Amino acid sequence: MLYVVATPIGNLGDISPRALEVLENCDLIAAEDTRHTQKLLSHFDIKKPLVSYYEHNKVARGPLLIEKLHSGENIALVSDAGTPGISDPGADLIKAATDEGLEVSMIPGPVAGIMALVLSGLPTDKFVFEGFIGTDNKKKQEFADMIIEEMRTVIIYEAPHRLLKTLEFLQQHIGDRRVAVCRELTKTHEEVLRGTATEHISHFTQIEPRGEFVLVIEGADKKTSRSHNEEATADDIFNKFNELSDKYASEGIRRKKNDIIKEVAAFFNIPKNQAYDMYETVNQQTQGGL
């Protein structure tokens, strides 16, 4: 039997009695990071064989674990924190086991994304989980194309060293939509910041991002978002630019013209160069009429 065991995302008090029971009685524990998991086991005085199973050895290690399952061993699968299979290589082992017709059970527990969603104050009835959006330009563009129209709440994970770039990316593609930035969930320095991407950028420009982050992003407003098939006029672009400019000025936020153009382009889901040309067309006409 393969047991998928959720472990604490920070506070060790969150581990369940069933999780401890499985870890104590299984034949082998497959861990994303054996050193990290050993600390957990030592805290609860559990002594079991550990084997590593992570992104860079899953191709070689996976078949060996499947072979052990076929031979009748009970294996507990754990990640560094939270629920295995959520944005980690555990999903591949679970799939391989189910493909082989092996029994798979789960001991549920903490999931950072769900905790952040609940704490965000944003709609929880419909949501989509995107995990890490990464740095691959093609994948980021696909994410950008999705999020501009996505009306459900969106959950993503992010590393501290990429947080500011991701917030800037969101600012360019969703403007002032609400975002909850959650860090160090269940830990001593747990923090949930609610605001816009612009406000978060200002905050984390002054305070270095530290810890593990979950971002919960408000879905698009059906009344204000535009579909791919709806064309924006030059007047629409010009008026939206001025609306955002006035808003930022009233809030004491200094933003470059090019950044606002990016935001306008994202709002209407058109290329930035097209938005710029349309803005300038009306802008020049307006100036010429003065």
Image (cartoon, rainbow, N blue to C red):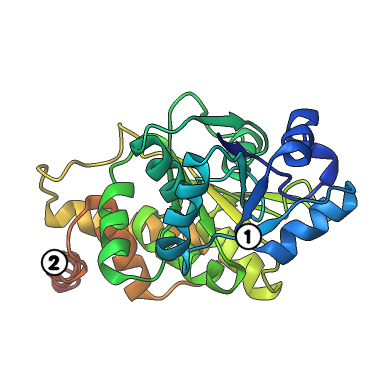
Residue at 42% x, 55% y is 63
Residue 40 to residue 230: above or below = below
Residue annotated with mark 1: 51
Q: Quadrant of residue 137?
A: bottom left
Structural crowding at the residue carrying mark 2, measured as other residues with C-alpha within 10 Å and reported as few (<14), some (14–19) or many (≥20): some
Residue at 53% x, 55% y is 157
Residue at 78% x, 59% y is 38
The foreground one among 166 and 285 is: 166
Q: Residue 90: x, y in percent?
A: 50, 50
Q: Residue 21: x, y in percent?
A: 78, 33
Identify the image quadrant of the N terminus: top right
**Amino acid type indicated by mark 2:** Gln
Going by the image, does 182 lie left or right of 147? right
Q: Distance of mark 1 from mark 2, alpha carbons?
A: 54 Å
The foreground one among 276 and 84 is: 84
**Mark sitting on residue 243:** none
Regarding mark 2 in the picture, which secondary structure is present there?
helix
Identify the image quadrant of the C terminus: bottom left
The foreground one among 1 and 210 is: 1
Q: Exactly how many numbered labels are in the figure?
A: 2
Regarding mark 1 in the picture, which secondary structure is present there?
strand
Sequence-first tag of 1 and 2: 1
Q: Quadrant of residue 102?
A: top left
Residue at 28% x, 43% y is 149
Instruction: Tell us which disc is closer to us: 1 or 2.
Output: 1
Going by the image, does 8 lie left or right of 117? right
Q: Residue 217: x, y in percent?
A: 48, 45
Residue annotated with mark 2: 274
Q: Residue 8: x, y in percent?
A: 74, 45
**Amino acid type indicated by mark 1:** Val
